[in-house]
Amino acid sequence: MTEIMVEAKSMHKIYKTGKVEVHALRGVDLTVRKGDMIAIMGPSGCGKTTMLNCMSGLDDLTSGTIKIEGNDLADMSDNEKTEHRAKRMGFIFQFYNLLPVLTAVENVEMPLLVSGTPAKEARTQAEEIMEVVGLGKVMHSKPGALSGGERQRTTIARALISKPAIVWGDELTGDLDDETANSIMDLVEKMRRETKATFVIVTHNPEVGKRADKILYMRSGTFVSVEQKGQKPVPIKQGTERPQERQTVNPEPEAKPTPTKVKPKVKQG
Ligand SMILES: Nc1ncnc2c1ncn2[C@@H]1O[C@H](COP(=O)(O)OP(=O)(O)OP(=O)(O)O)[C@@H](O)[C@H]1O
Ligand SMILES: [Mg+2]
């Protein structure tokens, strides 16, 4: 069994809108071990969300490879990617909206219902996880009646209820005050210990970054430095100016076969 959850090599993403090209990812490499929590930090527009979208299979790279648990995303059909996301991935996005017409607990049980869990079992599990995230008392409220922190706890419960192997977080404490952000991160750490899931989170908040095993700093589409937990950041060099053509597997033969003269075939008959 591989100990590597994410292995991404030379990721390039170019957005084309009309005549304008934005080179959002410029040859980024990323390896994440199973069970680790990685934080990605960097200024607005440096490519963080683009990278998460590509690694979770929501968007395609222009070139480069992404393997999740050893599976190359490029070899999966859209349906396979959707199924893989539902079964193996959880999402905690700031704007990954809760459905306003459903109650919090109904939002949370949704992924289980979609993947075919019987309604009663789904509700029991959803009620349990709502207790775990501290929302036992308000689980029957609709999102509009919850505070920002409660909504984010609901999103976390929904992301984790299907026991994903990997959780992608984009500004998961974005709009929250420091105290609430801290309690959300306490919850994330608790859930991480319980589920052993791998977390890749994007954040602008250094306090959130500090909770991760490793912070990767991004600038203009590549990582520029890495900070292991509790250590000083170390510069890294990544990236290329131009995307490479996707390499097709075409191994060179070990030794060139000695040319032999072949008699031209003569049609018989
Ligand atoms: N769908 C799109 N079409 C065209 N350009 C895009 C698209 N999405 C992102 N971009 C551009 O790609 C670059 C990277 O955007 P991205 O959203 O990944 O940044 P980010 O690091 O997540 O920023 P923020 O911290 O503000 O969320 C930006 O220049 C952005 O304008
Ligand atoms: Mg973003």
Image (spheres, rainbow, N blue to C red):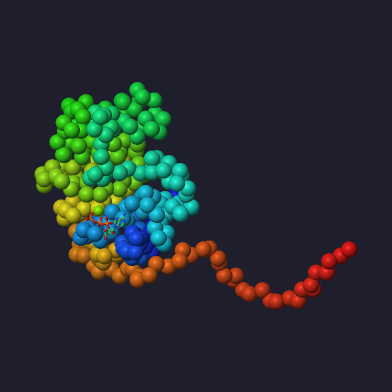
Q: How many labels does the image show?
A: 0
The picture places residue 39, in percent across and down from the top left corner, at 25, 54
Horizontal side of residue 265 vs 252, given as left or right = right
The picture places residue 99, in percent across and down from the top left corner, at 27, 34
Horizontal side of residue 131 vs 18, given as left or right = left
Horizontal side of residue 234 vs 25, given as left or right = left
Q: Is residue 259 above or below residue 151?
A: below
In the orientation shown, which residue stands out farthest toward the right? 269
Residue depicted at 25% across the width and 61% down the height:
46
Residue depicted at 76% across the width and 76% down the height:
261
Q: Is residue 116 above or below residue 231?
A: above
**Towards the viewer: 256 or 177:** 177
In the orientation shown, which residue stands out farthest toward the front? 18
Residue depicted at 30% across the width and 44% down the height:
91
**Towards the viewer: 20 or 30:** 20
> Does residue 125 appear anywhere in the picture?
yes
Q: Is residue 143 above or below residue 11?
A: above
> Does residue 33 appear anywhere in the picture?
no
Horizontal side of residue 32 vs 154, given as left or right = right
- Taking the image in four quarters, ligand 1 sits in the one at bottom left
The picture places residue 175, in percent across and down from the top left corner, at 15, 46
Residue depicted at 38% across the width and 32% down the height:
114
In the orientation shown, which residue stands out farthest toward the top? 120
Please identify the quadrant where the C terminus is shown.
bottom right
Which of the 4 image quarters holds residue 67? bottom left
Which of the 4 image quarters holds residue 214? bottom left
